[in-house]
Image (cartoon, grey):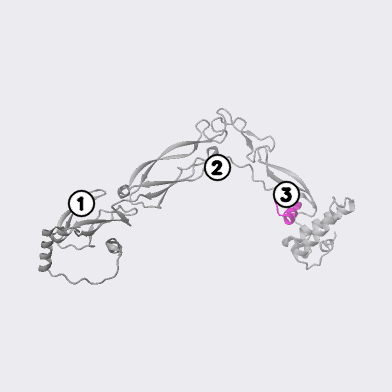
Amino acid sequence: MADHYEALGVARDASTEEIKKAYRKLARQLHPDVNPGAEASERFKTVTHAYDVLSDPKQRQNYDRGGSGSSQGGGFDAGNFGDIFETFFGGGGGGGGMRGPRSRRERGQDALIRVELDLDEVIFGTHRDIEVDTAIMCATCSGTCCQPGTSPVTCDICHGTGSIQRAVRSLLGNVMTSSPCGSCRGYGTIIATPCVTCQGQGRVRARRTVPVDIPAGVDTGLRLQMPGSGEAGPAGGPNGDLYLEMKVRHHDVFSRDGDDLLCTLTVAMTDAILGTTATVKALDGDIEVELRAGVQAGEILTIKDRGVTRLRGNGRGDLRVGVQVLTPTKLDHKERELIEAFAARHKAPAPALSQFQQGLFAKLRDRFLG
């Protein structure tokens, strides 16, 4: 038996890359397509076997210790040649490793729908029937893709494997490759009689109603996931998920700070001086608010447990009411005399500078959020 190193023309301490380059050079010279002689063919088998042994670290180590250097007992076969094809050309050479036909059943796509809510719906939660234009399973064929009474037939080209093997000629000889069957598109079966309702897809477009219980406490941007409520998959595949993205509409009176509700109560100057009872028309019913005598503009009145129900937890936030005192702008002669008399009896401090605020609403905002 010829020495493998001599067959490839490399030193015994040659690197794997040097062995690979030597074999590539000899294979191009000795390949039967290039050199059809019997002697060249035999030598081609010899250098191929030598490369098989020396390119495998375990076989090379065994060979260097005096062994045969081949777990196969020597010789050239198509399996080894497929490995060589992958080594040099990086692909799916070789006849083994087929994964079988692919399934027509696939998971349906997810869907995203934006849901607009009023602020009062957020306080306690609400129920909605959401109209969704989506794919549903075909009622005629129940997702089989076939006309009722028929079934898929085995592809007579790939015989149900879903792939076709072909011998490809290369510089290193014939190599078996595998590719999806063009007749059945890799499924292994053919829908000979497609369902006329869904045209063999197993699903149709339709508008359906999805009932949704929207929990209390949701806010703009929050997404609710409804598993299995998205599009039906092809060929009876499982449904995707439905995502509902919340958008809470602007309210003219109330705004939101977390789980608290904020609003401003405008009171007359006389009511602020003398005190009064005011009615706040809250989102979930009227609330009587007691204003103490001498209440100041910008004060915050906190009404416990009249805010938004907490999304993850118990109870509700608070309703915070900012007081705005309305000063009269037009006085008749008598009213002006009364105010002047009042001012004379209660000497007010001189106007003083303080930190600049962008109006009362900014002052209220700072108190709300401070």
In front: label 3 or label 2 = 2
Label 2 sits on a secondary structure element that is loop
Amino acid type, residue under disc 2 in the picture: Glu
Taking 336 as reference, is 32 left or right?
Answer: right
Mark 3: few/some/many CA within 10 Å (<14, 14-19, 20+):
many
Residue 50 position, x and y percent, is 80, 59
Tag 1 residue: 287
Label 3 sits on a secondary structure element that is loop
Which of these two is toward me, 31 or 301?
301
Could you tell me if the residues under marks 1 and 3 are in contact, i.e. CB atoms within 8 Å?
Answer: no
Residue 19 position, x and y percent, is 78, 63
Earlier residue among tags 1 and 3: 3
Question: What mark, if any, has residue 106 been given in the picture?
Answer: 2
Q: CA distance from mark 1 to mark 3?
A: 82 Å
Residue at position x 15%, y 54% in the image: 277
Residue range of the region highlighted in magenta in the rendering: 79-94
In front: label 1 or label 2 = 1
Residue 273 position, x and y percent, is 14, 61
Could you tell me if the residues under marks 3 and 2 are in contact, i.e. CB atoms within 8 Å?
Answer: no
Which of these two is toward me, 16 or 182?
182
Tag 3 residue: 94
Residue 46 position, x and y percent, is 83, 56
Amino acid type, residue under disc 1 in the picture: Ile
Magenta-span inclusion, residue 84: yes
Amino acid type, residue under disc 3 in the picture: Gly
